[in-house]
Image (cartoon, rainbow, N blue to C red):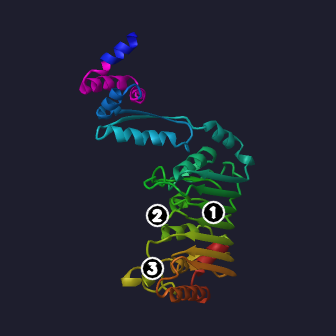
Amino acid sequence: MQDSVLMTGVGALPTEVLGEIFICCASADPDAPLVLRAVSRSFHAALHSTPCAWAHLHIHLIDIADNGPANKVAFWFRHASMALIRVTVNVEVGWGVLLGLREGVGRVGSLEVRAPGEVDVGVVMRGVYPVRAAGYGCWDMGMERPPLEDLKIAVAADTPRGVPLLANGRAEIPYLPRLRTLEVVNYYGLERYLEYAELGALREMRMEWEVRWRLVNVRGLVRVLGRARGVEKMSLAGKMIGEYAGTEYVMPLIEGAEGQNGDEAPTFTYLPKLKELTIRTNAVPVVLSYLVLPRLEKLRLEDLDGKRVGAGVEIARAVEGLVRRTGVVGVGEREKEVGEG
């Protein structure tokens, strides 16, 4: 009875007074608004008209894939309106699992990592394998070489817009000198992630991008391919440019020719052992125009933008250029020496 009378008295207070009380409650317990809003209609109304009562946000992360914390963040920002929020994030990730894998890394021959975002992939790889910051120092040649030969990285296709590609601009590179098979799905930070990686042992590579609103940097992709000189089988699939604009994207047919508008001619990527290539993209002529493939036996092409005017002619010219570069004397001779050495 006393509680009922007390609640009646408190509920009769003006909204502004209730708001000040709730601000004090939230300072002591950041989750207080969630409890108070369920007490009564007057409390609910007072909280929703007092943005500063939502000025403290505590997030507890246990499972990276859990959407609960994300929903809480969205809910909080809606109610805080324009008020500045003090955010505290407590992270409890299963580091014990990663440390256990690191201790047994010498027994892992194949690894598949599925994650909701690219940053999460980095957390796992850094937790298990020796790394170095891109462009900093050299590998310790005395360190144990992980026996990993088969790696698959798959990032969720429904990653929302605005999610960062990597935790920072200096990607940390896993030390995997024995890697023979690499499969990457929806990893758009690939260029930075593999720029300094050891890919000399790689024999098979498959890269696929399914997210429609993200575009692959073709030149960055080609630079990655250039590090895999021993690859024999390769598959590329995904959207690489927003709109194909004809020959302005296609490199000269012969190395040494002047670039368009007087620019320096681009560099070709020489893959001396590649025998099988599959390309499924809206930029087929673009990708082909970068490559020199002297041992190519099988070529499969699917133009996702094949309905554009002149698509067949452009692909025919790109294939012709690929054939000519393979047979032209002097093209890629320096790269041959490096690749076969």
Quarter occupied by the N terminus: top left
Q: Residue at x 55, y 66 (%)?
A: 224
Residue behind mark 3: 249
In primary-sequence order, the first of circles 3 and 2 is: 2
Residue at image point 59% right, 78% down: 302
Tell me which corner region of the image, top left, top right, bottom left or bottom right, holds residue 178.
bottom right
Q: Position of residue 307 (x, y in %)?
A: 50, 82
Front disc: 1 or 2 = 2
Q: Which secondary structure class fits the magenta region best?
A: helix
Residue 246 magenta-highlighted = no
Mark 1 or mark 2: whose residue is earlier in sequence = 1
Q: Position of residue 75 (x, y in %)?
A: 41, 40
Q: Is residue 13 above or below residue 295?
A: above
Is 14 on the left-hand or right-hand side of 211? Answer: left
What residue range appears in magenta? 10-37
Q: Position of residue 14 (x, y in %)?
A: 24, 24
Q: The residue tagged with tag 2: helix, strand or loop?
A: loop
Q: Residues within 10 Å of mark 2 (few under 14, many from 20)?
A: few
Q: Which is more toward the observer, 113 or 275?
A: 113
Residue visible at 51% across and 59% down in the picture: 189
Q: Which residue is at the front of the view, 267 or 64?
A: 64
Identify which amino acid the numbered label 3 is placed on.
Tyr
Q: CA distance from mark 3 to mark 2?
A: 20 Å
Q: Dot 1, crowdedness within 10 Å: few (<14), some or many (≥20)?
A: many
Residue at mark 1? 199
**Residue for badge 2:** 213
**What's the CA distance linking mark 3 and mark 1?**
27 Å
Element at badge 1?
A: loop
